[in-house]
Image: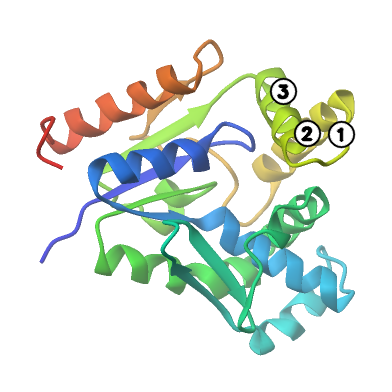
Amino acid sequence: MSYRSIAIDGPSGAGKSTLAKRLAQELGFLYVDTGAIYRTVGLAVRRRGVAPSDAAGVEAILPDLVITMAYEEDGLQHMYLGGEDVTEAIRENEISACASKAAALPVVRDFLMEMQRRAACEHDVIMDGRDIGTVVLPQADLKIFLTAAPEARAQRRYQELLGRGQQADFDQVLQEVIERDRRDMEREAAPLRQAADAVLADTTGLDLEGSFQLLLGLSRDRLGIKEGME
């Protein structure tokens, strides 16, 4: 059986996870949040007291990590580290920065590559991240590069943190967004870039519903999925 895949890449705060998750529900695809997988590594690195940019230190702990994901009754992708459900823990702001640095290491990307590709071999998937269309699923049926202005992405992240009851400063969040963009684009291992055959989707001036309708239209058009066929 041949499975279909949609790769959604883009910078931090572009809304990839939120939109990809809803799109998967609409189309009946499996949503794979690759960012959550890398965040789980970031959490493990932090708990072990290893600097996330220390390639040798991170490589040394990878063989001991048991990372799995499962889709529970709530419909969410739950991440497990050594059997512990860390789905909420990996969303802390400091884990985001740690995951970004660890994800820049080739050894980490190689470690997680098989887990991501295996999912696409077993299901119709929508996968989002930084290098899905360029490295992980270069043969994806549809590639979307989802982006928005840094200020718009920082505002979304700021509101998300406040909504979770975390303290946040907008200017600091904006600087973190800009710095993460720089790291993601300049890293040696699978840098953030738009695949040559990816469709650019800029949502700066769109609300959540407008952004979703844009991606839904692209998906139906490219995959030949008519309304009501999902």
Examine the rendered structure and indicate whether residue 222 appears above or below residue 99: above
The residues tagged by marks 2 and 1 sit, at their Cα atoms, a distance apart of 7 Å
Residue type at numbered disc 2: Leu
Q: Label 1, secondary structure: give it.
A: loop
Q: Is residue 110 visible?
A: no
Residue 131 pos. (x, y %): 50, 49
Q: Mark 1 — residue?
A: 168
Q: Label 2, secondary structure: give it.
A: helix
Taking the image as shown, residue 20 lies to the left or right of residue 4, namely: right
The residue lying at 83 percent from left, 52 percent from top is 94
Examine the rendered structure and indicate whether residue 191 appears above or below residue 169: below
Foreground residue among 219 and 186: 219
Marks 2/1 in contact by CB < 8 Å: the verdict is yes
Q: Mark 3 — residue?
A: 155
| Residue 123 position by quadrant | bottom left
In this view, the mark in front (3 or 2): 2
Examine the rendered structure and indicate whether residue 166 appears above or below residue 44: above
Taking the image as shown, residue 17 lies to the left or right of residue 223, namely: right
